[in-house]
Each structure stands twice: as C-alpha cells, then as structure tokens.
Image (cartoon, coloured by chain):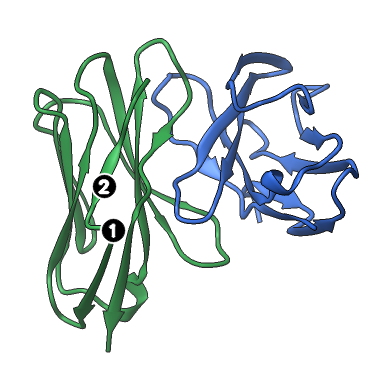
Chain colours: A blue, B green
Amino acid sequence: DTGVSQNPRHKITKRGQNVTFRCDPISEHNRLYWYRQTLGQGPEFLTYFQNEAQLEKSRLLSDRFSAERPKGSFSTLEIQRTEQGDSAMYLCASSLGLQGRDTQYFGPGTRLTVL
Amino acid sequence: ILNVEQSPQSLHVQEGDSTNFTCSFPSSNFYALHWYRWETAKSPEALFVMTLNGDEKKKGRISATLNTKEGYSYLYIKGSQPEDSATYLCASMDTGRRALTFGSGTRLQVQP
C-alpha cells in the first residue's frame, strides 16, 4: 500500500497525559499537512510542512501542540497535557508540492479520545 | 478567512436517483476548489481539483462544475448506487496559502 498511513488509528488517554501521533506520507511527496476534524464539522487545518520546514501554523495550534518532520519524510504531532476538547480525528495529508493546487492525499486518521 | 458552506447537510435517495449538492465559497482570492468523498472508517478520497471558472470535471457517474465569479460548485451523481453512500466534502484554497478550508460536508445515503 503506497498511500498515507497514520498510527495509531485510535488513542484513548486521560486528561493531562501527553500523546504523539505519527504520519507517513506518500514517499515522493514534499508537502505534509495536519488537520483536525470534530463531530459534524469538516476538517480544520492545523499546520503544514514543505520538506522539513514548517511553513504555516493555524491559530488552532496552541502551545500544547507541536509538530515535527525531522528528515522531511514522516511527521509527528504531539499534544501535551491533553484536554477533553482535544478529542477529535487527527488527519494527515501529503501532496507532491510542485504546485499550490496539488491534490492532497489523506490518511485514515487517528481518533483521539480524552477522558 | 474563508467560509465554505455546503448544502444540504444530509440527503437520502433511492438507488437509481440522480442527485446534486452545492458548495459555496468566497470568490475573492480564489485559487482552487477540491472535492472529496469520505466513507466511514476510510481515508477521504480525492475526487476533483478545479481551478478555472466554467470548469467541468467527470469521474464515472460523478461530475462537478465550478463558478468562481459567484463562488459556487455543484457535484452531481447520476444513477446513485448504495456504494455512493458517503460524506462529500468540498474545500477551497485561496491565493497565498496551501491550507484547505473545508465545508461541513453533505452526508449521502443511498437506499437499495
């Protein structure tokens, strides 16, 4: 399977704990995006990388959130001191990055539940 | 800030019916419009990327049109099948950004 993969698929944690999610993009894709989707809403943009550089961050990305893409390949999204409001589906997408309007290919998401 | 709206919120049709949904977006600073189909427990699947006013794209029984001057796009499904049941999302991208701004989606259920 050469699509975007995300791990874990599901994560249940207690409030105050830290969690980390991983995204493996399609291998030749330069751009990697993180989105968050809550019930009844469409996905909301969090941040994106061009290779290893984080080029844009949403105001949704509070200080408790950090994302990295250290070698320009996989990416991690960490949430520190989780809150119940962080419960959501976290989606990763990747694109070739040759043009701004390239198709973004999505992974299956990580569903986070904070108790 | 973009505000992308989709209607209807949900739709129930019978197998064989044709149907269409609407996506509206701010027309200023428009760059591209994306359509996705998202089935439960699967990854969102890209359907179309549309950029030019008057664009029409087709993939099997699904087609889409784009009007960038008035800020809307229609998605059509001809002869709906149960496997078309999914949430259909549109997302707009404006100039100078790489983020997609999504609507809330139209949930389609096709009854056999």
Q: Secondary structure at mark 2?
A: strand
Tell me if residue A31 can be seen. no
Q: From what the image shows, is residue A64 above or below residue A17?
A: above
What residue lies at 59% left-to-right and 41% top-to-bottom? A36
- For label 1, the crowd category at 10 Å Cα-Cα, with few meaning under 14, some 14 to 19 and many 20 or more, is some
Q: Position of residue A37 (x, y in %)?
A: 55, 47
Q: Mark 1 — residue?
A: B9
What residue lies at 67% left-to-right and 39% top-to-bottom? A25
Q: From what the image shows, is residue B106 above or below residue B35?
A: below
Q: How many marks?
A: 2
Q: In the rendered structure, which amino acid carries the disc numbered 1?
A: Gln
Tell me if residue B41 can be seen. yes
Q: Position of residue A33 (x, y in %)?
A: 60, 31
With B93 as the anchor, is A20 left or right in this view?
Answer: right
Snapshot quadrant of residue A19: top right
Q: Secondary structure at mark 1?
A: loop
Q: Mark 2 — residue?
A: B6
- Pointer 1 with pointer 2, Cβ within 8 A: yes
Q: In the rendered structure, which amino acid carries the disc numbered 2?
A: Gln
What residue lies at 64% left-to-right and 40% top-to-bottom? A26
Chain bearing tag 1 is B
With B50 as the anchor, is A112 left or right in this view?
Answer: right
| Quadrant (top left, top right, bottom left, bottom right) of the N terminus of chain A | bottom right
Q: Which residue reaches farthest bottom?
A: B112
